[in-house]
Amino acid sequence: MQLDPKYERVIRYYGTISCRTLYITGIQSTRILKRLRRKLIQFFAPIVELGKLVYAKTIGKQLAKLRTEIKIFQENFRRDGEHLKELSKGLTLKGAIGRLQHAGLHLVIRKKFVISVLNIAAPVLSAALLIGTISYWNQQEYGLVLRYDGKEIATIKDESVFEKATEMVNQRMVYDTVTVTNLKITPLFVLTAMDSGRFYAASTLCDRLIQQSNGIIEEGSGLYVDGQLIGAVKSSADMTYILQNILNTAPGADAQAKASFAEDVETINGLFPTASIINAEQMSEKLSGTEQAAAIHTVQGGDTATSIARKYNLTLSELNRLNNDQVGDRLQIGMKINVQMPQTLLHVKVVKKQVRQTELPFKTVTEKDDSQYTDYSKVVTEGKNGVQEITEEVTYVNGIESARTTLSKRVVTEAIDKKIVTGTKKRPQYSGSGESSGSLMWPVPSIRNISSYFAYRWGRMHSGIDISGGNSYGKTIVAADGGVVSYVKYSSSGYGNHLQINHGNGVSTLYAHSSKILVTPGQRVSKGQAVALIGSTGDSTGAHLHFEVIKNGKKVNPLLYVSR
């Protein structure tokens, strides 16, 4: 296939440009690399020359001497060998040995040869010895020998072990009333090489330091909460029993619950000042008791000094003492008030697995019926809630719920959907003839039930009848006879959404509590024409139609004019 000349020129043009670009790029790269090589040679040339000079003045010079001596040694050895060969002819054994002693000693021992060898070997051996020495001592473990009052107490890895041990000593001595509260130790450290397995731990060093003090000490088991010493008892078994008893009691009757301490609780056995050791009963009371801890209350709407004091079990004088007598009944929302709350030394966390049942709400499903008007609605199936079982992990801290996690959900009883059929056909929009037939029809064709009659009710006259039944909300209300809509009104109490139709001859009808009005004032309607939908607006306790008949301005019993 032959290309268009126009495209052929374009291809040739861009091909030429590409070749030139590649050529220029290659030439420039070569130039740059050559220039870089020259710069590097110029930069390192002095260093190389210096290295050659040092080598020539030291090792190179000695190697040259050694090579000369080796050549002389080889030449003498060859020459003396030939000389011995010639002389050996006709010599006795004793004469040959004497000649060897005379001629061979200078071959083996030459002063210059030995000196040349030593000049090279000595630095090499010295460097090797230095490297070996450094390597040996680097492989050694080093520690500190702790001396106090002229005595060697222990060997530790570093000073941090001593610092930690003295901190532990001071925590143990905090209850000591016999000796000084904080043990002051001025140590002397001596560096030494030692096997790492012989270093003392901080807890062991703590015991050794206490032994050096002048306080009265004895063996005990100390309780630490979040790193702070709470107290000590004589027996570690007593301490274990006290703590385990607290954990065993916390879950109550739930044998499956898991209890643990919210704080970091640790027991350490060792030497403690006698004054800091209490008996098991005192320790149990101390851990189960409460003490007042400082807290902050943020003032909210309705708070008064009295209500705040009552909430935290304080008197007004105690509340004022905590706040420098600045608390009065004129409190501002958001103000911070100092209060006190009871708090225990230990917080027990209990994790329980709980199962509970909840309602599973039903869904409402709407089906369309194109044979019914849009104001038609019928419940086909009543909805019913199901039952769901939820398994949860609940965490309590000192009996107060702090967290809740859902583990699983299981449907016990399925919910039954509520099904509603609604019409989709639009009702024709027309104005009726407005002609009255002279007789009234039942105003709700789909409901015939009367829930309240024309009679006295709750101490006053109920001036109409209430028509309602199951699922009556949204049912269609029709004009009892032809006529003209007198008015359409809404009131939040009383009739709610309501309308009145004038049928002529002094007869009017009223329709109240509607959810929706379908006509307008002045509109002419025919008998049986939809005018509203049943609702529960105004003063109503449920969906129904309040229907009235007015004759010459007086409300009369509707059942005298309509029948079911």
Image (tube, rainbow, N blue to C red):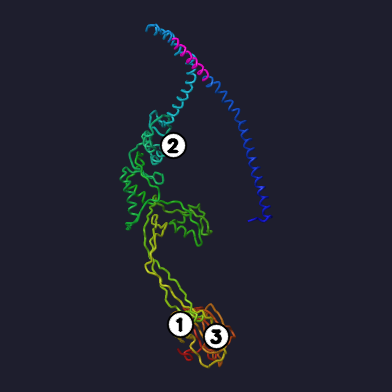
Type of amino acid at the residue the image marks with label 3: Gln
Residue 221 place in picture, x, y as percent: 34, 42
Q: Which residues are magenta?
A: 63-84
Dominant SS of magenta comes to helix
Which residue is under mark 3?
500
Task: Measure how far apart labels 2 and 1 are at the Cα level.
Answer: 89 Å
Residue 541 in sight:
no
Q: Counting other residues with Cα less than 10 Å from the Cα at mark 3, is it few (<14), some (14-19), or many (20 or more)?
A: many
Which residue is under mark 1?
468
Residue 193 in sight:
yes
Q: Nearer the viewer, residue 142 or 354?
A: 142
Which residue is under mark 2?
160
Q: Nearer the viewer, residue 534 or 1?
A: 1
Quick check: 91 above or below 515?
above
Type of amino acid at the residue the image marks with label 1: Ser
Q: Earlier in the sequence, mark 3 or mark 1?
A: 1
Residue 260 place in picture, x, y as percent: 37, 51
Residue 172 place in picture, x, y as percent: 38, 40
Q: Earlier in the sequence, mark 3 or mark 2?
A: 2
Asked if residue 548 is among those painted magenta in the image, a careful observer would answer no
